[in-house]
Amino acid sequence: MLCDANVRATVRAHGEDPTRLLGLYIDAVNRILEARPPGMTIGMHLCRGNLRGRWMAAGGYEAIAKRLFNDLGVDGFFLEYDSERAGDFAPLRFMPKDKFVRLGVISSKNAAIENKEAIKRRIDDAARYAPLDNLGISPQCGFASTVGGNPLTIDDERAKLRLVVEIARDVWG
């Protein structure tokens, strides 16, 4: 949510500093991660809301990317990139070379099937900022992140997951 300029303004209006909050959140997660078993891989999804196909926050990752990607002790990130509200891929330039990134370029908010070639072009664009070998694709969020779910059928979800697999095979072999 701290990517969203409106959310950042609201945080400031309540007397808090969004940059300080980001540090508190990173520190809290890192303390939790101290107890993870050896060999466990941790990926973090950065959610902007996903209730019945609606979202709660917009804005590119630029405001948080450098600090989050470098200071948070996870192994990788699942980032929402299914619409223009997520901004461009430029913040991926801050991603350390030892972390993975799953580009959430397949929407779980609507049933429309994305164009395979357009998604491949987006992956190429992302690879200008982070190594292709560190990238992958996924749906931008869960298909039913809340009890209300999203306006997709099981068949819609299967079609989107098939598309993810097809594109991954085409791009990464």
Image (cartoon, rainbow, N blue to C red):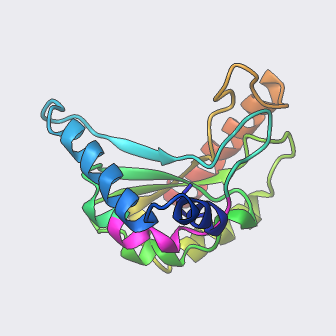
Where is residue 158 shown, x and y percent of the image?
A: 73, 29
Q: Which residues are magenta?
A: 58-67
Q: Residue furthest top?
A: 147
Q: Is residue 37 left or right of residue 45?
A: left
Quarter of the rendering occupied by the N terminus: bottom right
Task: Please name whichever residue, 85 or 90, is drawn nearer the observer in this view of the structure.
Answer: 85
Where is residue 151 shown, x and y percent of the image?
A: 85, 31
Where is residue 124 shown, x and y percent of the image?
A: 58, 73
Task: Please name whichever residue, 25 or 13, is drawn nearer the observer in this view of the structure.
Answer: 13
Residue at 45%, 61% (x, y): give it: 16
User: Total marks drawn?
Assistant: 0
42 in relation to 7, above or below: above
Residue 131 seen anywhere in this rendered image of the structure: no
Residue at 62%, 49% (x, y): give it: 48
Q: Is residue 106 left or right of residue 97?
A: right
Q: Is residue 61 magenta?
A: yes
Task: Please name whichever residue, 18 or 15, is drawn nearer the observer in this view of the structure.
Answer: 15
Which secondary structure class fits the magenta region best?
Answer: helix
The quarter holding residue 112 reads top right
Residue 31 seen anywhere in this rendered image of the structure: yes
98 in relation to 149, above or below: below
Q: Is residue 31 left or right of residue 96?
A: left
Q: Is residue 35 magenta?
A: no
Residue at 15%, 30% (x, y): give it: 37
Task: Please name whichever residue, 126 or 18, is drawn nearer the observer in this view of the structure.
Answer: 18
30 in relation to 92, above or below: above
Residue at 41%, 45% (x, y): give it: 44
Q: Is residue 55 left or right of residue 100?
A: right
The quarter holding residue 6 reads bottom right
Where is residue 77 shown, x and y percent of the image?
A: 43, 52
